[in-house]
């Protein structure tokens, strides 16, 4: 599991906490990895929201299983803080307070953040401060090489997913 976006200092946020991550799985016999799900966690003082969109077009939204996101084509799933809708045969949109995530089953993820999040985030998508030169800063805030940068935003439990006989760890790229 890799973190794309998370707040640098969640306790200082006036809008709640936001974390967007993805998991991958092997999708070929030659070791090619594909995105298997995207997770969006948005918590406020009054409500906790977790959305997991799966590549098989199913989802888990605040504990509610949705077997086929096509059911959200006519009527969106929504609450005070979230809006989730199947936009086309490929794309699902998740909109929250100041952000949107567009995901398709083919493994593309598009994240839009309002200016409020400028220089308040970190992750594989960078820090959103307008300077692409410093986007490769690891989770500790230190500029790093590409492998260290990627590894710093990897969930450490990911390495436990590798079968003992597998020479390649599922999260190293």
Image (cartoon, rainbow, N blue to C red):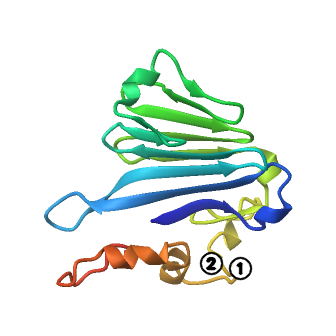
**Which residue of the protein is positioned furthest toward the top in this rendering?**
74
Local secondary structure at mark 1: loop
Q: Is residue 172 visible?
A: no
Q: Position of residue 67 (x, y in %)?
A: 34, 33
Q: Residues within 10 Å of mark 1 (few under 14, many from 20)?
A: few
Residue that badge 1 annotates = 141
Pick the front one: 33 or 7: 7
Asked whether the residues under the numbered discs 2 and 1 touch, taking CB atoms below 8 Å apart as contact, a structural biologist would say yes
Q: Quadrant of the N terminus?
A: bottom left
Residue 169 shown left or right of residue 140 in the figure: left
Q: Position of residue 78 (x, y in %)?
A: 61, 28
Residue 104 shown left or right of residue 93 in the figure: left
| Residue at 80%, 47% in the rendered image | 115
| Residue at 70%, 36% in the rendered image | 81
What is the spatial separation of the Cα atoms under label 2 and label 1, in whole angstroms? 5 Å
Instruction: Give the number of the disc on residue 117.
Output: none
Number of marks in the rendered image: 2
| Residue at 55%, 78% in the rendered image | 152
Pick the front one: 41 or 130: 41
Residue that badge 2 annotates = 138
Q: Position of residue 15 (x, y in %)?
A: 81, 48
Q: Residues within 10 Å of mark 2 (few under 14, many from 20)?
A: many
Local secondary structure at mark 2: loop
| Vertical relation: 97 (above or below) 128 | above
């Amino acid at each position: 599991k890799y973190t794309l976006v998370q707040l640098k200092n969640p306790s200082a946020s006036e809008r709640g906490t936001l974390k967007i991550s993805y998991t991958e799985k092997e999708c070929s016999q030659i070791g090619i990895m594909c995105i298997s799900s995207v997770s969006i966690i948005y918590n406020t003082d009054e409500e906790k929201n977790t959305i997991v969109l799966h590549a098989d077009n199913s989802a888990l939204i605040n504990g509610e299983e949705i077997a086929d996101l096509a059911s959200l084509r006519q009527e969106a799933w929504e609450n005070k803080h979230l809006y989730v809708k199947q936009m086309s045969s490929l794309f699902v949109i998740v909109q929250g307070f100041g952000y949107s995530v567009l995901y398709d089953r083919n493994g593309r993820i598009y994240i839009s953040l309002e200016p409020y999040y400028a220089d308040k985030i970190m992750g594989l998508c960078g820090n959103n401060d307008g300077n692409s030169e410093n986007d490769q800063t690891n989770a500790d805030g230190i500029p790093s090489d590409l492998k260290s940068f990627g590894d710093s935003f990897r969930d450490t439990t990911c390495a436990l997913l590798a079968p003992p006989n597998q020479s390649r760890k599922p999260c190293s790229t």
